[in-house]
Image (cartoon, grey):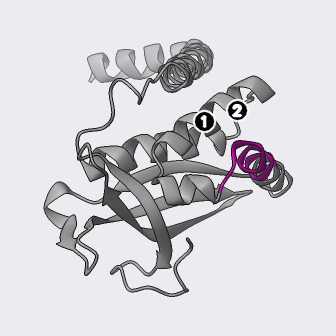
Amino acid sequence: MKKVIRVAIVTLLCAGVMVGYYYYLNNTMGQKQQGAQAQAVASEKQRLLEADFTKNFPPTPRETMKWYNRIVKLILSGEELTDGEIRTLAEHARLLMDDKLAAENPIDSYVKNLKGQIADYSTRKAKIVDASVADTSDVIYLTDKKGDDLAYVQTSYFVKEASTYSRTYQKYVLRGDKDGHYKILAFTLTDEDGTPVTTAKK
């Protein structure tokens, strides 16, 4: 009984110290976490800026989409980017596009559109917090009437806007080129099951 009382007294005497230590620890860990997150974002940004798809193109349609989504996520993550960095990321994204889609998105127009999207997201206090790609087993391959090799890849984007969250789904069509590289040809907005809900964008 004395031991229990002694422990209770010690606990009460230490309460202020414990609370103070908790706030100190919480603040320290918070700062460390923020520092680690900032470092991770910086490292990811550097990796994306230094990517060279002319020498190392993604080996599969899924990998192409994973790279593309990483670029999109960075651009619309709220991370501060210079005009030069936005242009470099835009150039990288266009290298992942089929020649047809890239021709419909000239670099200057594409950069302008991206800056418009960044401004819109900033105004709405929105950012992409996660972008995912379907598993390899869910990628659909087929050959169309023209003999083109196509791949259909489902993706999803988790967006935070102010204090609310939402998830959107898109299905991308990628076409294999003469080198066997699958590049983005078109996409359409879908529901969670991959059923189109709008006309495909091309």
Q: Amino acid at mark 1?
A: Glu
- SS at circle 2: helix
Magenta stretch containing residue 201, yes or no? no
In the displayed structure, does residue 122 sit left or right of residue 128? right
Q: Residue at x 28, y 52 (%)?
A: 61
Q: Which residues are magenta?
A: 105-115
Residue pictured at 32% horizontal, 26% vertical: 56
Residue at left offset 30%, top offset 44%: 63
- Check residue 91 in the rendering and tell me which mark sits there, or answer none: 1
Q: Are marks 1 and 2 in contact (CB under 8 Å)?
A: yes
**Looking at the image, which is closer to me, 74 or 8?**
74
- Dot 2 alpha-carbon crowd within 10 angstroms: few under 14, some 14 to 19, many 20 or more: many
Asked if residue 143 shows in the view, the reply is: yes
171 relative to 34, above or below = below
User: Can residue 169 be spotted in the picture?
Assistant: no
What percent of the width, then of the height, locates residue 134? Answer: 28, 60
Identify the residue at the far left of this view: 137
